[in-house]
Amino acid sequence: MKFNTKTIHGGQIKEKAYGAVMPPIYQTSTYSQKSPGEHSGYEYSRTQNPTRHALERSIASLENAKYGLAFSSGLSAIDAIMKLFSPGDEIISTNDLYGGSYRLFEKVFKKFGLKFVFTDLRNLNEIENLISSKTKLIWVETPTNPMINIVDIEDLSKICKTNNLLLAVDNTFSTPFLQKPIDLGADIVMHSATKFLAGHSDVILGLLALSNDELAEKLFFMQNSSGAICGPMDSFLTLRGIKTLHVRMQRHCENARVIANYLKKHDKVDDVYWPGFENHPNHNIAKSQMNDFGGMISFTVKGNFDLVKRITSSFKVFTLAESLGGVESLVNHPATMTHASIPKEERDKIGITDNLIRLSVGIEDISDLVDDIKQAIN
Ligand SMILES: *Cc1c(COP(=O)(O)O)cnc(C)c1O
């Protein structure tokens, strides 16, 4: 089955009771048993629910994985992975990491004895120097947020295999439409389905996909033991969103391409971060591991914070808001919004300066989007 068919049919089975085309929302906590222990495969909805199960099979199919697991949020999916480790274990991650993941690592799991090391994962020699006998996992995001750096998943997976480490990829920005980490050698793929996968800014949900039997068993155990599962309604909404993923992503990418090129020529714009430019430092990796360049763009304007504040408050079609990946275009000021929790020196070091603006390009008519950017900047 091709990807564009899988978004609609991947992992789905015929509903037997009435032939419903969409999986019903099984809003139930428990299931009747014929005799003690004799049940239909579902006994209690924390452990398993048919609507959630349909979503879990869908993400497994999209990521070319054997197993899928669904959680109440992207962060609870990451939380389940971190609970696989024991005090003393070390995890290497990117220094340009989603703020919520950083908070979970440094403010929650560090207390339980896990050690996190942050580095530029594009620098492979540096990573080899950081690996110790205690290192268990490399956690990567690509493209990164908000600097849109690209990390080579296949190269990282080779380092992981040589050193007997797990490789987990946060695939939120790319979605399996653009990039399939398991095919590139990753062990676990994680999604904030809240963003592009569900795609309509109406649900918070997290997903994992993986193929290793033993690892899957441990994660199912964690999902059931900690219980951070998503409800059947949210599972249904995410499944519904996924059915148009390929059409939406195509338009996100098309629109972003036009906007990136528009911004590049604008005399009030300094740098534009979009991996589709041939002079983007990681353009060749993006070209080889992604099918297109995605809907996320960051750029800097020539001017001070006051000007940036005026620009970001002047959009009419773009909405000034956190989050990303929905059908509607959003504008974000990382330094005061999504990345405000990172100390200013750290922000400046990685390029999150006060004049940096991030766009999540939606699927509206491109001429309305360009006009909006034009009037906001001018
Ligand atoms: C939003 C986001 C998360 C966290 O997901 P939630 O669904 O908000 O818990 C993790 N990683 C990335 C890259 C994100 O954008």
Image: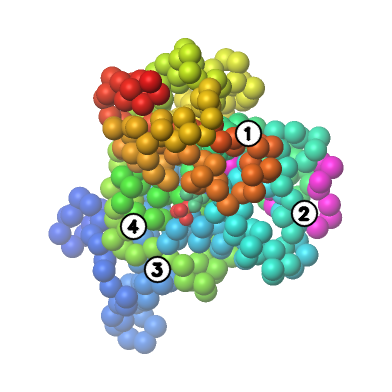
Q: Residues within 10 Å of mark 4 (few under 14, many from 20)?
A: many
How many residues crowd around disc 1 within 10 Å: few (fewer than 14), some, or many (20 or more)? some
Image marks 2 and 4: residues in contact by CB distance under 8 Å: no
Q: Nearer the viewer, residue 232 or 297?
A: 297
Residue at mark 4 to residue at mark 1: CA–CA distance: 36 Å
Q: Secondary structure at mark 2?
A: strand
Say which residue appears at 60% left-offset and 20% top-offset: 280
Kind of element beneath mark 1: loop
Label 3 to label 1, Cα distance in Å? 43 Å
Q: Quick one: label 1 or label 2, which is nearer the N terminus?
A: 2
Is 339 above or below relative to 184? Answer: below
- The answer to whether residue 338 is above or below residue 304 is below
Magenta region, residue range = 128-142
Task: Decide which of tag 3 and tag 1 comes sooner along the chain.
Answer: 3
Q: Which residue is mark 2?
A: 135
Q: Is residue 127 visible?
A: yes
Mark 3–mark 4 CB contact (< 8 Å)? no
Q: Is 362 rendered above or below residue 337?
A: above
Q: Which residue is mark 1?
A: 351
User: Callout 2, which amino acid?
Assistant: Thr
Which residue does the image show at 40% across and 23% down from the upper left?
377
Horizontally, is 129 left or right of 335 in the view?
Answer: right
The answer to which of marks 3 and 4 sits earlier in the sequence is 3
Q: CA distance from mark 2 to mark 4?
A: 34 Å
Q: Residue at x 80, y 38 (%)?
A: 126
Which mark lies nearer to you, 1 or 2? 1
